[in-house]
Every structure is written in structure tokens, then in C-alpha cells.
Amino acid sequence: MSTPSTNPLTAGTSRLIPLNHALPWIIAAVALVLLPVIFDSRSALTIMNQMAITIVFALAYNMLLGQGGMLSFGHAVYMGLGGFFSMHVMNWMSVDPWLPLPVLPIFGGLFGLLFAFLIGWFSTRRAGTTFAMISLGVGQLVASLSIIIVIFFGGEEGISGNRTEMLPFFGLDFGQQIEVYYLTAVWLLIAALGMFLYSRTPMGRLANAVRDNEERAEFLGYSQRNVRWISFCASGFFAGIAGALFAINFEILTEENLNLATSGTILLVTFLGGVGFFIGPIIGAIVFTLLQTVLSLHTDIWALYVGILFVATVMFFPFGLTGLLALHVLPWKLGKIGYLAKPYAKMIVPALALVLSAAAVLEILFHVRHAGRGENEMTIYWTTFDSHSPLPLILGIVVAVVSAYALAKLAPGLKAAWDEATTMREAGQ
Amino acid sequence: MTASAIELRNLNKSFGLAKIIQDVNLEIKRGERHAIIGPNGAGKSTLFNLITGKYTPTTGQVFLHGQDVSGKKPFEINRMGLSRSFQITNIFHKMTVFENVRCGLLWSMGYKYSFWTMVNKQRELTRRTDEILEQINLANRRNMLAGALAYAEQRALEIGITIAGGADIIMLDEPCAGMSRSETELIVDLIRKVTEDKTLVVVEHDMGVIFDLADRISVLVYGQIIETDTPERVRASRAVQEAYLGTTLEEEAS
């Protein structure tokens, strides 16, 4: 069962694709092998596993949003269902183990595919708002069902299992977290490569065509509905794999895994990274998971910061963080990236000051509102002070305003440098 | 007896109370270059959309090669060998010129909904795409985004996508709309070149454009075909002259 899954890997690196195409994948594979050597703590492994799962889910989601132009508000359903089913398979296997843990994601994927097939049958008939509304409705429906159909979803406490009770895989029982890490990493590579190759098949190109102009595609012999349906099924399959990886890692699934909040989060993650690029969701998932896990250790209002980042991204960089990076490709190719160094260097101090002081103001306000009576002392940036005294708040506001003003003053300089760095005319001279 | 490429029988289309197409009967033979002209609002585009499957007839039938296609979906009609272009440029803006044309080839080359073949590895597909790019003179724009092309080039690409699949009935909706005189000449030459041995149906507002191109012309006024004949006879027809905008076709054509 596990042999076909390694095929795309070897095929991708040796024969199918020339070396320069394979290079990013080789680097990714090496990085995945080395990462746990560098970050070897338990919490680091947990974060990296969570990152890998989010990457697979976000890439699957982007098959719809970025590749197919379908905005789904309920894609957690397919990840969740894949996860729940994997959990059941895991539990059946603990009674009579005849399959090893590494094949579990195939079951998650197939279950996600099955439901994407059934629900896609009616939800993909129309694109745009209709599709979005149906996805929202189905998301709500399945989340509600999860509390009603207790035998499958386990009610409010969800269902849990034990991954170590499946058939040992070459002597491994996956009790160690590092073993789970490598299992997740291998599946991350398989899934990512699978989705990448998919985007280069006729179906992958047609998903783009229907996204850009569904009417035209229809007059070229393609049913727009079938193209959307197949994309939806493929996306459901990979989302199901992400669900199985979640089941393997956390050994519990609850309603939270398929509700609308989770669906919203993956939209946010994908958009943050950039829907127009294959690598976008990967960057989005990495940044988001870091914010979610690292930032939440330091502040209770981390979600607010993520929200602000999201709104700022949508407003100023509609192509996401990857789009922001991609903007620099042209100056780089023109050999003029150096033009930008100086204005960036000038802006980095006020930008940092703005972010830190604005965060300080928010933290002080939050502390004043939420700390217990008498707990007036708070510590941020290694400084302890009385949150109720006006001085720190005023200081924070002043720094924020001054640095915002400085940024506004520096902006024209950046724009001028930018114009210079992106014009081809001078490069030729 | 071979059936006509396109046959319309008592075709009617109403939107609410408005009768846009009324009792249209028309036969277009294989290999014929047929033009449909008429003043604005005559129902040319509606007729076009009825034939290509975008609209379903209210009553009456459309036959392609003798087969009733009334009510069939656009993609089904396309698979039967009819391909169309659009009046308003209708290309895949965010894809390259090359990919645009390639999309037009995929179905006819049997790729269907394949998700197991690498599209860049298909030599024959790439070769034929490049061949069409040569034909429509866009080979030097191959890797540009289609949305970044100049208007006249987008119109040429539109025709390239339309003919790519090798359909034997080509329908062009105002292929020269919004073009200058010299650009129009280039496009008409291109149309003549790429539709050789094919059935061609062109909808045009401006008769001058298709006068040399068409074997026969149908004149559509208020949803009815008032005349179908050779360009010379249509131009001379009194009924046509009276109905067609009150201006004489001589002026239109000049």
C-alpha cells in the first residue's frame, strides 16, 4: 500500500522533471530532514507538525481558491471528515491491526474525496456567490450534524484513539514524536508534490481557464461544472490527507475540526500567503502557525494582531506575502535591488517603533480592562510598570504617532527609489 | 445527400414578451462562408447564441450536420465541431498567449479531464499550439500574458483560440468590432486564411467588412431574415435598402 505513494517523489526528482525544477523539492526534502535536528525540543516538533498539516490543508484549499477561483467558507468539512474517518480506522486497527499507521492518510484522503464528490455534485453547478453560500451552508450543516450523529463524531468530546496500536511499520510504532514528525514530513512532501504536479496537468490548466473565463472554457468543449467538480474532488482528497495527519498527530478530533471558524482560518492563512502562487499557502501556513503558537505564548490578544495583519494584507498587498516578495523579482533581475536597500534601512526603525508602540498601547488597554482588581503591575518589553498610570500609555501613543509620521515622510522616498528600481530604460544604458 | 452544416427551422426566441427572433429559417451549406448582417438590436447576437447553445430556443430547432442540437449545452455543441468567437474579447486574461491557444486544443486532442498527464511534456500539443501561434502571427508574443496584448492582437488571439480545436464550423461574432481600417484588413485576411475548407458564419454590423469574404449574406431586421442571397444581390435589394437603417448599403459598404 505504501509503495505507490513514493513513486511521485522518485519520478519527480529523476526522470519527469529536469534538475532545476527538482531543486526546490530537493531543498525542501533536505530542510525537512534537518529541521528536527536544529529544533529538537518537544514544542518545536509540535509546532512543525502543526505547520505541515496547515500547509497541506492550505495547499488543498488553494486548489479551489487560487487555481479554481472558488471561494469556499466551509472547506474544514473535508479535512474534518477525513480526520474523523482516519480516527475510526485507527481505532478499528487497534482491535485487529493489519495496516500500519503511515497508510492512514490514504483513508483520510479517500473519505474527503468521497464527500467532496457528493457535495460537489450540487455545490459546483454555479461558481461565485452561489458556490460560496452553499459552502457556508454545508459547513454549518456538517458542524451541526457532528453533535447529532454521535456514533461517528463522538458528540461534544469528539473521538480519540491511539496511533501506537496499529501494525508496526518496520519496527516503528510511532510512540516517539520524532517518528510522527518524519511520517508527517513525508506525507507533506507527497501531498505538496502531488498538488504541484496536478496543477500542470490538463485539469490543472483547465481549472485556471474556468477561473478566468468560464464561458470561454464552455465554448472550447469543457463543461465548467465538471471542471469545478473535479477540482473540488481533488481538493477534498488532499484536505482529507491533512485531516488524517491531524488525527495521527493529536489523536483526537472534535467538532472544532470541521466548524466554520476552522474554515475561516484556512481562508485567512491562504490569503495571507498569497493565492496567486503555488508557494503562497505554504508561506501563509508557516507565518500563521508561528504567530498562532509563538505569539500566543506571549500575549492573550494574539488573534487581534493576526486580524490586523490580515486586514493590512488584504488592503495593501492583495497578492499576499508571496506577492510582496514577488514584487522584488523585477528589481532583482534588473540588478537594481540595491536601490531599495537605503530607503528600506531608513524605514525599518520607525516601522519597528510603530509596531511595538502600537502593540504596547493595545496591551496596556487590555491589561487595564482584564487584569484582576489590584493587579496594576504589568511587564512588556522587559519593563515593569503600573498599567493604570497614564504615563506609559501616553508614551506609547506619542511614539506610535511620531513613528507613523516619520514613515509617512519617508514613503515618497521609497516610492521614488521603487520607480527607479523597476524601470528598464536606465538598466539598458 | 449530405446534410447542411447548419439548419435553422422556425426558430423563435422570446425574452418575456419581447420576441427577439421570429420564425427564422436558414440553411448554411458545408464550406460556405455565410455572413449575418443587420442593424443594431436586430437580434444578430441572439441568433448567434441560439446556434452556439448559450440560449435555448423558445420554439423551433437548430440542426448541426443534420443533428438536432436545440437545448444542448455549449460544450456539447462544441464537441460536435462548432467553435465560436465573441464580440467582446473573451480570452483567458491571466494566462499566457500560448496557454490560451493550448486550452483550445485540449479537448480535440483527447485530453478530456486528464489529471495524470503533464501538459508541458506533450510534444504534439506544444507543436500544434505553436503552429497556430504562427498562423495568427502571435509567435513573438508566445509567453506574454494575454491580458497585456494590444487590442488587435487580442482579437487575433480570440480567433486563434476559436480555430485551435479544429472545428469544421467556425462562428465569429463581430470579429472586427472596434478596429481601425488597416487592422480590419489584416483580420479579414487572417479569417480567410484560417477558415479555408471550413464552414464560416460571421456576424457583422458593418457590411463593408464581409462583402469580399462572404459567399452569401443574410439580412436580419427586427428578428426576421428579410433576405438571403449573394453579396451583389443583397446590396441591390430594395427591401434590404429600405429596412436597413434607412441608409443605402452602398454608403455602408464604401
Image (cartoon, coloured by chain):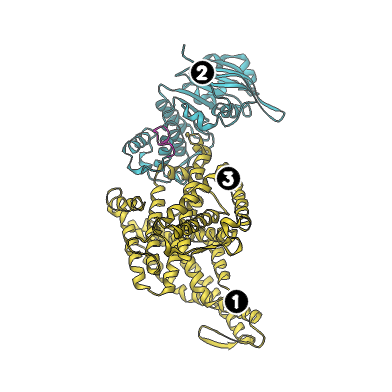
Q: Is residue A231 visible?
A: yes
The image shows residue B222 at horizontal and vertical percentages of 65, 24
Mark 1 is surrounded, within 10 Å at the Cα level, by few (under 14), some (14 to 19) or many (20 or more) other residues, namely: some
Numbered label attached to residue B66: 2
* Residue farthest to the front, as pictured: A96
| Circles 1 and 3 on the same subunit | yes
Rate crowding at label 2 as few (under 14), some (14 to 19) or many (20 or more) other CA atoms within 10 Å. Answer: few
Say which quarter of the image contains residue A265: bottom right
Which residues are drawn in magenta?
Answer: B106-113
How far apart are labels 2 and 3 at the CA level? 36 Å
Q: Which mark identifies residue A362?
A: 1
Tag 1 secondary structure:
helix
Tell me the yellow chain. A
Mark 1–mark 2 CB contact (< 8 Å): no
Prevalent SS, magenta region: loop
Residue B127 sits in quarter: top left
Residue A123 shows which numbered tag?
3
Q: Given contact means CB atoms under 8 Å apart, are the residues at marks 1 and 3 in contact?
A: no
Q: Is residue B97 magenta?
A: no
> Between residues B245 and A160, which one lies in front from this camera angle?
A160
Quarter in which the C terminus of chain A is drawn: bottom left
Image height of B108 relative to A33, above or below: above
**Vertically, is B195 above or below A288?**
above
Q: CA distance from mark 1 to mark 3?
A: 42 Å
| Viewer-closest of B147 and A141 | A141
- Image mark count: 3
Mark 3 crowd level (few <14, some 14–19, many ≥20, 10 Å Cα):
many
Q: Position of residue A266 (x, y in %)?
A: 52, 59
Q: Colour of chain B?
A: cyan
Residue lying at 30% horizontally and 48% vertically, measured from the top left? A16
Amino acid type, mark 1: Leu
